[in-house]
Image (cartoon, rainbow, N blue to C red):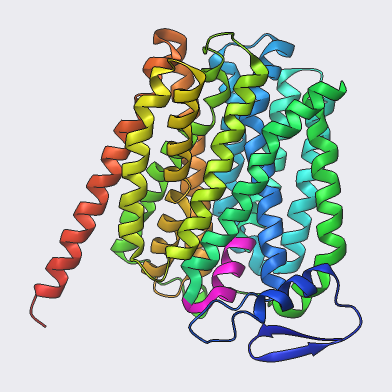
């Protein structure tokens, strides 16, 4: 059986082509034109691994009500679990270029995923909040190493269609993240509770490793540190403006998603299962939003798509915030999910494009910005919620949207000024 791997124009023939090779061949047969993204089997593996990372990242928010009940935590203490993940993400993002250069892409990628499994194991067995926080910190430190490898590899394999590849990867991430609340609901129904998250991740990782190691080894170079990264060239000023944009983009997304389950408990009936399902609706909307954006990217400018997504979020926020009844609250959360789903992949793509070829450095720094946002926003919201209520704290969402708009406007003026300046 002959399958086209589509990597650097080379063909691979063999009997070891497993599930991801079949998916890659099916997708590649539809993308023969050089004007389209060529989805190799390795790219499918990267998408799947990005989904597993997102599942772990997304599971913490819906699990917070269960952790609060089990450990008798207040809002601030509960938010520290997400902050612990973000702290590890920041530290790991700063160190990942050195670690990748020392050990190579393949070892860091798979070792990081194994580290996540160890961290989840510690979390489900933790008898105290201190140990649960330590477990989350460990899974973040190791998992973010994999994330840096994944984002840089997807960007490289995507080539000129980098933004579409990143959007599709984040679409897979949203799909996996959407599963987390429903795994929790299923776990409660089956009597396993929130700890059902462990077998869900373990099975997913085992399947991906079984079918995906060979495509990764065959198509992804073990080192993607560019010459400019080795020289230590400075990143352009435009990159740092977009770096700040990543921070607020992720901050707004997590301000909506992290506290959604807790906030929706205030709906009539005060049902935890209904609230968790609402968080799942948010994730499903995020999947749909990234699916639509992946089709629009390349046809419409990235900044225009991003602005449209911000408008959708601004429309949906009042419906969600009012929390008058389940239908309107879920509708508002759906619109917010459709909007914020585009924030990170588009801002990441814009920042990598502004990095002038320094893909690995830009990807690692993006993880730092993302981690910083995840560290600060849920915690700040928790602190405000403890003193003034969660409803008041959620006003950080329109505030973040306003800052994002200012950053985009300032960037547009800077670009216009550069074009008009004489040579």
Q: Main secondary structure of the magenta part?
A: helix
| Magenta residue span | 150-160
The quadrant of the rendering that contains the N terminus is bottom right
Looking at the image, which residue is at 46% across and 44% down? 338
Looking at the image, which residue is at 44% across and 17% down? 323
195 or 96: nearer the eye? 195
Of all residues, the one furthest to the bottom in this rendering is 10
Left or right of 109? Residue 253 is left
Left or right of 99? Residue 156 is left
Q: Position of residue 251 (x, y in %)?
A: 43, 38
Instruction: Work out whether 17 lies above or below 370.
Output: below
296 or 260: nearer the eye? 296
Question: Is residue 159 one of those drawn in magenta?
Answer: yes
Looking at the image, which residue is at 22% across and 46% down? 406
Instruction: Work out whether 141 lies above or below 185.
Output: below
132 or 204: nearer the eye? 204
Instruction: Work out whether 418 lies above or below 398.
Output: below
Q: Position of residue 245 (x, y in %)?
A: 35, 49
Image quadrant where residue 209 sits: bottom right
Image quadrant where residue 258 sits: top right
Q: Position of residue 325 (x, y in %)?
A: 47, 16
The quadrant of the rendering that contains the C terminus is bottom left
Q: Position of residue 24 (x, y in %)?
A: 72, 74
Looking at the image, which residue is at 19% across and 54% down? 410
Task: Decide if residue 222 is in sight here.
Answer: no
Of all residues, the one furthest to the front in this rendering is 327
């Amino acid at each position: 059986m002959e399958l086209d791997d589509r990597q650097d124009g080379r063909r691979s023939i063999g009997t070891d082509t497993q599930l991801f090779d079949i998916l890659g061949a099916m997708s590649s047969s539809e993308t023969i034109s050089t004007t389209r993204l060529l989805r190799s089997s390795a790219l499918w593996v990267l998408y799947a691994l990005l989904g597993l990372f997102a599942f772990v990242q997304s599971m913490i928010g819906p699990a917070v009500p269960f952790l609060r009940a089990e450990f008798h935590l207040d809002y601030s203490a509960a938010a520290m679990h997400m902050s612990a993940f973000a702290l590890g993400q920041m530290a790991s993002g700063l160190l990942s270029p050195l670690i990748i250069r020392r050990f190579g892409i393949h070892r860091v990628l798979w070792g990081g995923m194994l580290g996540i499994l160890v961290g989840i194991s510690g979390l489900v067995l933790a008898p105290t909040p201190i140990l649960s926080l330590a477990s989350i910190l460990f899974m973040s430190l190791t998992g973010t190493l994999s994330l840096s490898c994944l984002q840089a590899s997807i960007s490289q394999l995507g080539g000129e269609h980098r933004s579409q590849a990143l959007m599709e990867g984040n679409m897979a991430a949203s799909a996996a993240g959407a599963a987390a609340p429903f795994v929790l609901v299923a776990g409660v129904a089956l009597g396993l509770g929130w700890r059902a998250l462990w077998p869900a991740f373990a099975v997913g990782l085992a399947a991906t490793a079984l079918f995906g190691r060979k495509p990764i080894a065959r198509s992804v170079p073990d080192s993607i540190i560019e010459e400019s990264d080795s020289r230590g060239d400075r990143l352009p000023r435009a990159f740092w403006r977009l770096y700040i944009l990543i921070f607020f983009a992720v901050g707004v997304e997590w301000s909506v998603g992290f506290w959604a389950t807790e906030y929706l408990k205030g709906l009539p009936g005060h049902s935890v299962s209904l609230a968790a399902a609402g968080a799942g609706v948010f994730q499903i909307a995020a999947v749909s939003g990234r699916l639509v954006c992946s089709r629009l990217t390349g046809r419409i400018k990235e900044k225009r798509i991003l602005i449209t997504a911000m408008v959708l979020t601004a429309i949906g926020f009042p419906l969600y915030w009012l929390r008058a009844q389940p239908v309107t609250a879920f509708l508002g959360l759906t619109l917010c999910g459709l909007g914020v789903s585009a924030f990170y992949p588009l801002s990441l793509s814009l920042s990598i494009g502004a990095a002038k070829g320094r893909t690995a450095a830009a990807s690692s720094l993006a993880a730092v910005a993302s981690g910083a946002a995840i560290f600060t926003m849920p915690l700040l919201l928790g602190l405000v919620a403890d003193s003034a209520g969660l409803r008041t704290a959620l006003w950080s969402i329109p505030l973040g949207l306003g800052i994002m708009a200012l950053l985009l406007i300032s960037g547009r003026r800077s670009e216009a000024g550069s074009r008009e300046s004489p040579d």
